[in-house]
Image: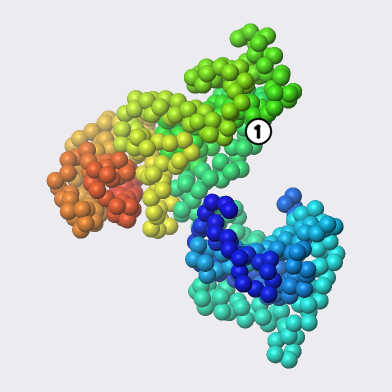
Amino acid sequence: MEDNQQVSKVGSSIPNKRQITKDYSLNIQRALMNKLEATKREAHLEFKNTGGGLVITADAATFELIRQATAIYYSRMTQENILIQEEKDKSGNIIVQHSYKYNNKDYCYTVNFYNTKSKILVNGKDQDRFVDVDLTEIRQIAQNAKCGKSKVNLTQLNNLMRERLEQTVGAKITQATCDKNVNAGILCIKCNRSCRTRSAYCTSGKHWVHLYKTYISPVLLYGMELLTPKSAHLETLEKFQKKMLKQILSVPMSTPDPAVYILTGILPVEAQIHTKMMTFFSNICQQSDNSVEKQLGKRQLAVKSSGSHSWYIEVQRVMFKYNLGRAIDMLNNADVTKTTVNQIKRQIANHWVNEISVIANLYQGLKYLQTDNFMAGKIHSILKIKRYTNKDRFRIPIKLKLLTGTYSLQPLRYKIYKEGNQEICNACSQEVETVEHLLIKCKAWDNIRRPVIKEIENILTSNSKIEWESLNEGTKIQILMDITMVQRQLRLNSEEVSKIEHQAKRLIYLIHSARCKLLLQP
């Protein structure tokens, strides 16, 4: 029995039937929306061969008819030849998938019905038999189905299902929805929203980072564990990655590199290549002693000098860099397991995390950025905080510029444009314009600042009993810049943090907008 699954026999007319309960909760809203989309499909059935098998896409009504007809068809089979499986979500009340595994001495294939997507996947070495024989019989059963005394009208049934689903999810059909295949653009793989029209959540960088790691990084570094690029080539790859990540975060190219790594959780290209190299080498170590790769490795490590261009010698250099021992010892070790590989990955990641954190502490502009929770593969917690409005897509880039020290305050503007009173704030003409002055000191922005700070104070006092005025200047700035650094100190829960962060982004953007209007005046 697999982890996080519960398998049980179910009383039925078919003895070979079982249920599996998965350890996840179905997103009901998304499932209903998927079903609603299925009612609008023009073709009753579409067939597509993929690497994973034959995918049959059906409209909602046809899918339900085929599913019921399939259940009838396989109930007539010899019980030893068919295994029927139902997969439920954690609640145990919703069947998300039906599977029929047909297996006898002549044929073997599996038919999977994905109920929330109205799709069927047929795989196995004899999947053609399902199409040529079984599906013909199943379609005949479906065509004979009746609603009352008349045959089922698929168009009317789809329309009826669409009306009921629209009432349930509150989604009315519009022309824009009907034409979405033409104008939708790219969909975010995480939130399933169009990145052109509904990208408020995506423009924080959070889900775009997932896109980068899923589609771009694997192609960028394909085969690099064997090529092991050096100097110029490695620098070219690193420049591309940094440029892409800075564009994802909507920060300037002048943003310190450590800030990009900390915010996205993505390590430098060199670290990723070294991880891939050690993973590949670990796979060689797990092979039998008679394998060509293992014998070649032992010979290369014994004969080649440390200055050799041999791939195995390059692995040895990587192992020395991260204190992983000797390559020949690892080759001779018969106990290299998945746990060993994970330990190696962690050691490489920890090396780079420590190095990046040390460098980040040298940047004065990053002093308000939380670096203690920096972990390889984990997006910074400031980007994980719950969003409240689509306006955040405009606010987040400004917040990140302040957080990474790349916001154009007056000292920098004077150096570049020679405008204003050198380093003095143009709004109040009293003090040097710093982040601290801009956010909490400048009297010119008091009217903007006061109502927002009042909202933050109400959140702090309602549950945590913390008075805003009792906090020192550093803590106030930290709350506005990166509240995750003082969350534990102030004993704030995640809901309070998200509300305060929402107000902090509002304040920063309002001050930024007012400041821009002032600077644009003649």
Residue 405: name its quadrant. Answer: top left
Q: Residue at x 55, y 75 (%)?
A: 166
Q: Residue at x 56, y 42 (%)?
A: 212
Residue 121: name its quadrant. Answer: bottom right
> Viewed as shown, does residue 504 lie left or right of 471?
right
> Viewed as shown, does residue 103 lie left or right of 171?
right
| Residue type, mark 1 in image | Tyr
Rendered view: 223 above or below 521: above
Rendered view: 373 above or below 191: above
Rendered view: 102 above or below 160: above
**Number of numbered discs:** 1
In the picture, which quadrant includes the C terminus?
top left
**Circle 1 — which element?**
loop
Front residue of this view, candidates 318 and 463 = 318
- Residue 289 coordinates in the image, percent (x, y): 70, 23
Front residue of this view, candidates 96 and 271 = 96
Front residue of this view, candidates 278 and 5 = 5
Spot the residue most to the left.
Answer: 470
Rendered view: 33 above or below 195: below
- Residue 503 coordinates in the image, percent (x, y): 30, 53
Residue 328: name its quadrant. Answer: top right
- Residue 371 coordinates in the image, percent (x, y): 36, 34
Neighbor class of circle 1 (other Cα within 10 Å; few <14, some 14-19, many 20+) is few
Spot the residue most to the bottom.
Answer: 149
Q: Residue at x 50, y 54 (%)?
A: 199
Front residue of this view, candidates 168 and 456 = 168
- Residue 410 coordinates in the image, percent (x, y): 30, 35
Disc 1: which residue: 222
Q: Residue at x 37, y 37 (%)?
A: 373
Whether residue 144 appears in this view of the structure is yes
Whether residue 429 appears in this view of the structure is no
